[in-house]
Amino acid sequence: MTQAAFALSRYNVGLASETDFAGWRDAARELALADVSPADVAWTVAEGTSGVFPPPHATRTSPLQVPRDFVRRVETVICHADPQRFTFLYRMLRRLSMEPHLLKIASDQEVRRFETMEKSVGRDLHKMRAFVRFRKIGNGEDARYVAWFEPQHFILERNAPFFVNRFTGMKWRILTPYASADWDGERLVLGQGTSRDAAPADDDAEELWRTYFSNIFNPARLKVKAMQAEMPKKYWRNLPEASLIPGLVAGADKAAKDMIARMPTTPAPHHAKVQARHWPVRPPAKPDMGENAASIPALRNAARDCRACPLWRDATQTVFGEGPADASVVFVGEQPGDQEDIAGKPFVGPAGKVFDQVLEEAGVDRDEVYVTNAVKHFKFEPRGKRRIHSKPNAGEIQVCNGWLTKELKLIEPELAVALGATAAQSLLGKAVPVTKMRGQVIERDDGLRVFITIHPSFLLRIREKADAAAERERFLGDMKAVKELMAAG
């Protein structure tokens, strides 16, 4: 606000500092009770000025009420560097006194501006905590630690208590262009800002820090965009390790190849003989396939630690079945996919969504059926950043069949629906031509009826729209047939 504008305004408000929340709050309340328009108020930060001049006369008979959450959030937003923030926040206060639910209107431009400013200050607070680097001055009892930081907003006063709690036993000073914070171990003092020249130069510890940083840098996991998003370049000039970043990034490809070349090789053949002579081979423990589990929850808990086949090593977690423990129908798929592996739930990915839609159209309530997979861990091949589904082999299907067998024994369903060839093989103990036997019901020796159909993921692989629509209609017909079998018992 210029001096001319300040002089021409009907009301002039003086604030003690850029972050004088208490001064803004008291003045805004006084002005709002007098029903003063935001356009008639000039806000300025100047030493020696305080309060509203001339004092307004209250005209409102009702008390001023705004959501408590707004007042709390203003303490953050007032730290923003926008010179118009005091006027803007006063305007928001006036609107909220008349529209109590204003902050819930996401489409409102001023609400969006308020939220954007709040997030910007929050990010700046976080970056300061992450990127402040102290340099040691003096030794012994005279030792102090000084840091220089250039925040985007006026956040030092708000962040100083964090550094007091983090470095309580250390005497430190943080310098910024607009303010400074000094902690002597007992008392925090906020002072004037300064220039970069007042900050100390590099100390001996910085070379040690650079050595540490270069040694922990992993070129194989480098993601430049993600790194710069988390550590923007504007902060680099204050970080001792930042001088190494361009060289480390440029040489990352070669460094990654060198890491691979240095990986341990296969032990020499004679090592096995030495191991056999000194460490007798123990027979591998029989994997626990939930033989003692008396309920589905107990069986699911036992399956979390399944190590019966190698698939657990690369998978995120075991994806067990879900649904009522007394369901009359069990749907069996092949294996969890990428999204199921992350979520830990079956049929929640793209194929699962198709499955849910078709079930609903067929009149089958998914909450009343049990859904599981023949194989409980995600088998995949890495392709860049993606994990591509890989079909389980016969050995993996056979090993994992112990879990499915136990599930069926505890649930005792009247019908099992094999969704695809892998599920059919697991349920019937042999390979089955799904396309030929689709829609058929096969009764097992134990009396369980097995309905054969395709896996819903097949529908997602059909490129021609007409073919995809026709195949989806066939799958819907299969689910309607399942519904009829459920009704028939």
Image (cartoon, rainbow, N blue to C red):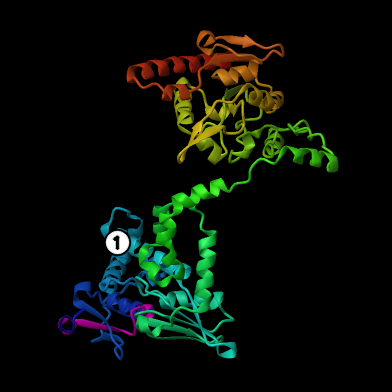
Tell me the residue at 67%/32% (across/down).
309
Q: Which quadrant would residue 482 be assigned to in this image?
A: top right
Tell me the residue at 69%/24% (across/down).
405
Does the stretch in magenta take in 164?
no
Tell me the residue at 75%/41% (across/down).
271
Segment colored magenta? 6-22
Tell me the residue at 15%/83% (across/down).
4
Query: Which quarter of the image is occupied by the N terminus?
Result: bottom left
Q: Which residue is mark 1?
A: 113
Residue 221 versus residue 115 in the image, above or below: above
Out of 422 and 488, give the one closest to the viewer. 422
Out of 26 and 146, give the one closest to the viewer. 146
Percent from the top left, x then y, of residue 136? 51, 82
Residue 362 horizontal side relative to residue 177, left or right = right
Q: Looking at numbered disc 1 in the image, what kind of residue is underneath it?
A: Arg
Out of 30 and 122, give the one closest to the viewer. 122
